[in-house]
Amino acid sequence: MQKDNWESQPDPNLAIRIMKRSIKLVPSLTDGKGIEALDVIRHAVGLRPMREGGPRVEKEKINGIWVIHQYGHGGYGYQASYGSAKEAVALAIDLAAKERARL
């Protein structure tokens, strides 16, 4: 993760550092032969915008209509999706209960 880096082309030096860390973490990837033994198909870049201050999961009334915001998770959006969705649903249920109570 590199804040404010919008380069769309892979960085060869970063790729080498990632491969070295991967082998250090899981030596069986190359049976001790180093990064040269990795079978790399291609390198890719994923641009994943992240909200300054972290994800936003909250409710806001806009022009008299309730809106539930849920965005800004960046590169860990998939990992955070279930917990984040659970929070958004809880906000919606709370809003629905309050609206029903006023009827």
Image: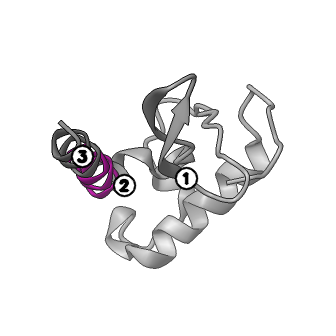
Q: What number is the disc on residue 80?
A: 2
Residue at 75%, 27% in the rendered image: 9
User: Quick one: label 2 or label 3, which is nearer the N terminus?
Assistant: 2
Picture quadrant of residue 67: top left
66, above or below 32, in the image: above
- The residue tagged 3 is 89
| Quadrant of the snapshot with the N terminus | bottom right
Q: Is residue 2 visible?
A: yes
User: Quick one: label 3 or label 1, which is nearer the N terminus?
Assistant: 1
Label 2 vs label 3, nearer the camera: 3
**What stretch of residues is rendered in magenta?**
83-93
Specify few, some or many for label 1: CA neighbours under 10 Å numbering under 14, 14-19, or 20 or more.
some
| Quadrant of the snapshot with the C terminus | top left
Q: CA distance from mark 2 to mark 1?
A: 10 Å
User: Quick one: label 2 or label 1, which is nearer the N terminus?
Assistant: 1
Picture quadrant of residue 26: bottom left
Q: CA distance from mark 3 to mark 1?
A: 16 Å
Label 2 vs label 1, nearer the camera: 1
